Image: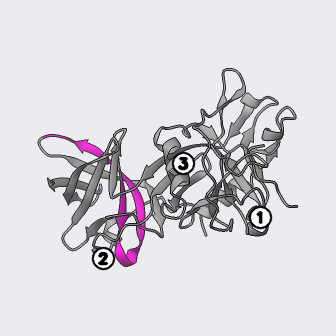
Amino acid sequence: MLFPVNAHTTLLRASSLCLSALATFASPLALADSLVRVDTDAGSFALQLFDSSAPGTVENFLGYVDAGSYDGTLIHRSVSNFVIQGGGFSFEPTTGGFNSVMTLPAIRNEFGMSNTRGTIAMAKLGGDPDSATSQWFINLGNNSANLDNQNGGFTVFGKVLGEGMAVVDSINALRTVSIDGLSVFSEIPYLSLTGTTTSDADWVDLEMRSLSTSSKFSGGTLAVALDAGDAGKAMVDFVITQDSPTIVIALVPSTALFIDATVDKMASFDTTSGTMIIPELEIEGSITYRNLVFQLADPATYSFTLESFE
């Protein structure tokens, strides 16, 4: 079975990110871990990945994230005060069945950190420490006494940031249902159920996006890791509202995820000058532009004009 054996705040602050409240200009910080944004039907949260302590596991996880393999998948297991689990299946409404994620080769176990509350770890086959592929779980409590001591230890490779555990806990608080007596779907959470078939259920679907440097442009969205000094740090999205004669981007306030971690060369905003500096921009896996300087053009719409770049 691709899951560990059970031994027995407010939600996302994404209603706004008022740039006028970003009080301190922050210089780019030292190399830090990758971030992953997780958007679910029940709310959004951010993950910090432990690139140094579990490099192979992080690389494997990001491979699925960046390929879009987790987009449209669902949380297929939720055990009260133990774990929520995903990364394995998506729902196919036309058939009412579940499709398995196409997996990469299994990876080597890299156990080294305890399965405490808020950490994310890889699921694997019983009796085979080196069998993890795509499935992951988030620990809802301190499961170290159990999960650190079976099957070579379950590899922790990241943690939930900021107030994200409020979202995770809300998913765990949902009712669950057992599907057709299948053990893998014996505790699947749902948001609502309007009938008696799988197609009548509103499952907790999700999407993921990674960010390993200042910013990434993909699918028309500019994702930015923004360090605001004493005011905190956030993952935020911008959209391009004008591309000629100058590029103008606008913040999407509802996308703000406040975090308590850094990535390499985070972007910064100076409220005094209205200047936002993005040290690096990643496009299609490569750092394409550096030192992008944006000027706040319209505080009412959080719009910025591109002034220069390298």
Residue 250: x and y in percent read 29, 51
Earlier residue among tags 2 and 1:
2
Kindly indicate whether the residue at mark 3 contacts the one at mark 1 (C-beta within 8 angstroms): no
Q: Position of residue 39 (x, y in %)?
A: 54, 48
Mark 2 Cα shell of 10 Å, populated few (<14), some (14-19), many (≥20): some
**Which residue bears the numbered disc 2?**
24
Secondary element at tag 1: loop
The Cα atoms of the two marked residues, 2 and 3, are separated by 34 Å
Identify the residue shown where x is 29% and y is 67%.
268
Disc 1 residue crowd, few under 14, some 14–19, many 20+, Cα 10 Å: few
Residue placed most toward the observer, 59 or 37: 59
Query: Distance from label 2 to label 1 (Cα)?
Result: 45 Å
- Residue 149 disc label: 1
Q: Position of residue 114 (x, y in %)?
A: 67, 68
Q: Nearer the viewer, residue 170 or 15?
A: 170
Report the disc number at residue 61: 3
Asked which quadrant contains residue 121, the reply is bottom right
Closest to the observer: 75 or 109?
Answer: 109
Q: Residue at x 72, y 25 (%)?
A: 96
